[in-house]
Image (tube, helix red, strand yellow):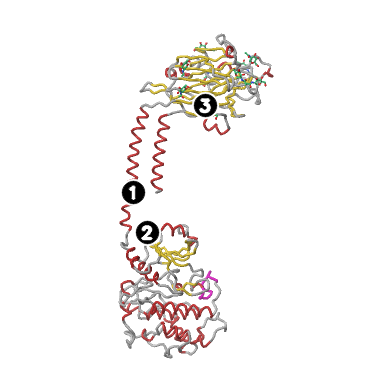
Amino acid sequence: MCFSQVVWSLLLAVLLGGALTQVGCLDFNFSTFKKEDDHNLIITKGTTILLNAIQVTPDVANDPITNYSGRIFYNKPFRLWSKSKKITASFNTTFDLKITPDLSSKQSPVGEGMAFILAADTTLPQKSEGQWLGIVNASTNGSHQAKIVAVEFDTRKSYEEDIDDKHVGLDVNSIHSIEQVSLTKYGINLSKPYLNSSIKARVQYGGKVMNVSAKTNKTSEYKLIFSLPLELCSYLPEKVYVGFSASTGNAIQTNCLRSWEFHGSKIADEEMLWVWITVPAVLIVFSMIVFYFYWQRRHRVQPEDAYPRIEDQIQGSSMAPQKFKFKDLRKATRNFNPKNKLGKGGFGTVYKGFLANKEVAVKRVSKDSSQGKQEFIAEVTTIGSLHHRNLVRLIGWCYERRELLLVYEFMPNCSLDRFIYGNEELGMEEPTLGWERRHTIIYGVAQALDHLHNGCEKRVLHRDIKASNIMLDSEFNAKLGDFGLSRTLQQSENTHHTTEVIAGTLGYMAPETFLTGRATVETDVYAFGVLVLEVVSGRKPGNQNEQSDYNNNIVHWLWDLHRQERILDAIDSRLTKEFDEEGMLSMLVLALACCHPNPHQRPSMRTVLQVLTGEVPPPLVPPERPAFVWPAMPPSFNEDAENFSSGSQLSPFTKPTGR
Ligand SMILES: *[C@@H]1O[C@H](CO)[C@@H](O)[C@H](O)[C@H]1NC(C)=O
Ligand SMILES: *[C@@H]1O[C@H](CO)[C@@H](O)[C@H](O)[C@H]1NC(C)=O
Ligand SMILES: *[C@@H]1O[C@H](CO)[C@@H](O)[C@H](O)[C@H]1NC(C)=O
Ligand SMILES: *[C@@H]1O[C@H](CO)[C@@H](O)[C@H](O)[C@H]1NC(C)=O
Ligand SMILES: *[C@@H]1O[C@H](CO)[C@@H](O)[C@H](O)[C@H]1NC(C)=O
Ligand SMILES: *[C@@H]1O[C@H](CO)[C@@H](O)[C@H](O)[C@H]1NC(C)=O
Ligand SMILES: *[C@@H]1O[C@H](CO)[C@@H](O)[C@H](O)[C@H]1NC(C)=O
Ligand SMILES: *[C@@H]1O[C@H](CO)[C@@H](O)[C@H](O)[C@H]1NC(C)=O
Ligand SMILES: *[C@@H]1O[C@H](CO)[C@@H](O)[C@H](O)[C@H]1NC(C)=O
């Protein structure tokens, strides 16, 4: 789990960070110096990294380099001793010095020299050039304020006390050496003009004694130059910086450091103690946080199950479609990328996705959607078990993290409503569908509805037939579905007769729906009739409810044309004369029959199919629109279909329980 990884790495960082900052072990190895090494170094002005070496005083190539001094330090301090435990650290350091005299300057003698230094302060003292070697200046010389210890490699006899121009000395807060040894007897010349010449020196400090050794080349052995008892803690603060200083005088040389390794010991003391106390404390706090999050996750499972046993109910059904994991669907839709959006409605949003390289449509039911658990289960178990070429196939479902998701086959041509209306539909300049295609679509929807009403083991009502719920595949075959655009849900504020919530879409609702609030086989047929009128005329169904202006309604408009015996005027003017007039007339009359105000006079979907195939003539319709009378008479049709739906009004597909 990602979260715990973060916690553990944080913990580790705290532990390591604590250890590094609190224990202060210093260990590094510069086998050579590169430009980028200056991140790890403190370098004074005039000091440069050049030709794989640190030029502690400026290079000869620069302008006059007389009377310069410089310093370099490693940028982290070295913890030299511990107050409480009276322990002094030990260290070993080896380095490679290359001092080249500028013989051309004709100045003699050359100078001045370099020094390995341990200092409290990294700033270069003013006027520390020449004889001062960048260690001290005239005012700090001999003062315990200087807080500096140096191992000098002196190339010039500057004072009476200096024994010669090639000696190593140990200086404490002063340029005056408490010990100095000439290198002559070791055959070492500190300052040589050859490119290959450098001297290697080693300083070892064991806490009480300081040893300084040197040699001329890689193969030779280090020779101990001096071994001196030295209490560094008497002169230096707890934390010191380690580095080098150098200077030039009147006569010049380059002072280079070519390599440097340093190994310092750790001191465990009260700060370590602090680490030992805080680390477990931090550990405990983190464990508690981790535990808390785990606990929360565990406990979230319970409120998460807003719909308990939803899985049992779905999987208990015989032909449940595949169950998907949320994370797979999220991946398939690229984290529900708005760019993948196909449609949006009151129920949620439909996204295009790729599952196993196949295009799918993923409906993500919004949490505040009216589509609740029962509707979800109904949809999964009903459509999931229906297989018909004119029904959109439900591939799978997912219920996780309080999210309800449905996966359908992808319909490249979206929904019918994009194609049938005239140019008033701005921004949807789809080509007009020809008569052939329109007929195929109507026939497809009729077959789907007939399958729902009569072809399945149990009768299914769609309850929301409308153009936006007719999906079109790549060959413009109609597939009845319900996703795409919003499914309007009207609180029945305009109906005085019932307070029930009416499901469906205005314009497609049979007149009796406003009284009964119930969906029936006949209300599906009515909506189908409206759809046929739309497809034939290319007009929108218009608004219709009990009290609205009837003139605006496609059904009344058609009944009017029929009364005036001009019914063929209803045909979409964009359809040129390519259609068969008799077939068209038969379809319009069929549509009128479907939209008969009396539900019992409407044909069944079986009859509709027979009319569409030409097997039987269209039902007879009265010359004028009959008045809507309720209760409808005669009650010759089967009534039981009316009893289904009140429990689950919102579902587009409702499995009747009574049959
Ligand atoms: C320091 O680096 C040099 C060159 O890479 C290597 O020869 C030497 O062994 C290293 N020293 C230590 C203590 O690792
Ligand atoms: C360098 O300093 C010394 C002593 O302060 C001085 O005599 C000499 O003139 C200086 N040299 C240059 C070139 O400034
Ligand atoms: C310094 O070197 C000596 C001898 O080689 C060794 O015993 C000691 O552990 C080293 N100290 C550090 C801090 O590396
Ligand atoms: C010595 O160096 C210190 C610190 O940089 C400075 O304050 C002081 O003035 C210098 N003394 C001389 C004689 O330049
Ligand atoms: C520097 O100070 C020391 C005392 O620590 C003294 O002996 C020495 O003469 C001084 N050197 C100079 C050049 O002033
Ligand atoms: C050290 O080198 C310089 C310059 O090459 C030379 O003048 C001097 O004699 C050498 N001294 C020894 C002891 O080798
Ligand atoms: C350095 O070079 C000089 C002259 O090129 C040669 O005499 C000397 O032996 C060399 N020394 C080393 C340590 O390679
Ligand atoms: C310093 O040298 C002496 C004498 O060779 C030796 O006994 C001691 O262990 C050395 N100390 C360190 C810290 O290397
Ligand atoms: C290295 O130094 C040793 C002893 O000082 C010497 O015998 C040897 O010749 C030197 N090697 C080179 C390559 O200069």
| Residue 294 tag number | 1
Q: Main secondary structure of the magenta part?
A: loop
- Which residue type carries mark 3? Glu
Query: Which residue position holds label 2?
Result: 400
Question: How far apart are the two marked residues, 1 and 3, measured between alpha carbons?
Answer: 48 Å
- Mark 1 nearby-residue class (10 Å; few <14, some 14–19, many ≥20): some
**Secondary element at tag 1:** helix
Residue 489 against residue 14 in the figure, above or below:
below
Region in magenta: 419-429
Is residue 219 found inside the magenta-colored segment of the image? no
Residue 29 against residue 373 in the figure, above or below:
above
Image quadrant of residue 580? bottom right
Is residue 421 found inside the magenta-colored segment of the image? yes
Q: Give the camera-side residue of 174 and 359.
A: 359
Q: Position of residue 81 (x, y in %)?
A: 41, 22
Please tell me how many numbered marks the rendered image carries: 3
Question: How far apart are the two marked residues, 1 and 2, measured between alpha carbons?
Answer: 18 Å
Q: Position of residue 423 (x, y in %)?
A: 54, 74
- Mark 3 nearby-residue class (10 Å; few <14, some 14–19, many ≥20): some
Query: Which residue position holds label 3?
Result: 261
| Residue 274 tag number | none
Please say whether residue 8 is visible from this viewpoint: yes
Question: Is the residue marked 3 within 8 Å of ligand 1, measured from its CB?
Answer: yes
